[in-house]
Image (spheres, grey):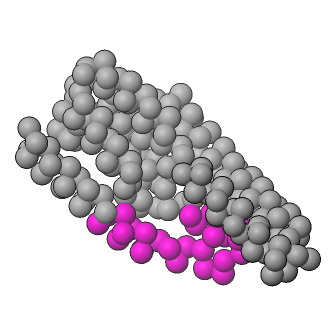
Amino acid sequence: MNVIFTVVFIASMIAIAIAAPENLLSSLLGGARDAAEMALTLFCIYAVWMGLSALAEKSGLSKGMAKFLKPVSRRIFKTDSDAANECLAMNISCNLLGLGGAATPYAVKAVGELEKQKNSFAQKLLFVINATSIQILPTTVIALRASAGSAAASDIFLPSLICTFVSTAAAVLLFLIGNKIWR
């Protein structure tokens, strides 16, 4: 993938150098500025949500959520591990809030716990759910749209909810069908 991006970048630079050489440097600097602003915005968003996730862990809220979600988690992921269920609950709740980046550390911990049990079914299912991730509240996208000056940053709410629900349902269904066929 890096090769493709490098080729596209070099081809773009050659094209702008030929078509409008006076715009080459300003385009490069403007793109770098925009990338830095986006990175800083994402850093701030994730800092807030990771802080709230840490508070949820320290206050015992994550254990409570895991206990509440344990029957569902046990049934879906076929695991009895309390540690795995807690990580799975936090991962899914972060994804529901549209915080894919904050969900990743919990997915890594969950996979580690599931590996101890040699539960490859749950690991694969977790990957499918994380790849599609239902978002009840697409907070990251809303925050990025707001920081970019969108007049209606939350207009993405309903389309995002519908799309992520359909994609997750389809992916899980296909995974379960494929799992039955290939067993």
Provide residue 22's location: percent of width, then percent of height.
Answer: 92, 77
> Looking at the image, which is closer to me, 109 or 87?
109
Provide residue 50's location: percent of width, then percent of height.
Answer: 59, 40
Is residue 41 in sight in this rendering? no
> Looking at the image, which is closer to me, 137 or 20?
20
Reply above or below: 121 against 132.
above
Instruction: Name the residue at 59% across, 51% down.
Output: 3
Residue 106: in magenta span: no
Quarter where residue 73 is shown:
top left
Instruction: Name the residue at 50% across, 74% down.
Output: 156
| In this picture, residue 132 sits left or right of residue 182 | right
Q: Write the start and end of the magenta stretch as one range.
A: 141-166
Is residue 44 in sight in this rendering? yes
Provide residue 29's location: percent of width, then percent of height.
Answer: 86, 63
Provide residue 91's location: percent of width, then percent of height.
Answer: 42, 41
Instruction: Name the residue at 82% across, 64% down.
Output: 28
The residue positioned farthest toward the top in the image shown: 116
Quarter where residue 85 is shown:
top left
Q: Which part of the image, by quadrant, shows the C terminus?
A: top left
> Looking at the image, which is closer to me, 144 or 60?
144
Reply above or below: 54 against 8.
above
Instruction: Name the residue at 78% across, 55% down.
Output: 36
Quarter where residue 13 is shown:
bottom right
| In this picture, residue 77 sits left or right of residue 84 | left
Q: Number of callouts in the render?
A: 0
Q: Main secondary structure of the magenta part?
A: helix
| In this picture, residue 16 sits left or right of residue 8 | right
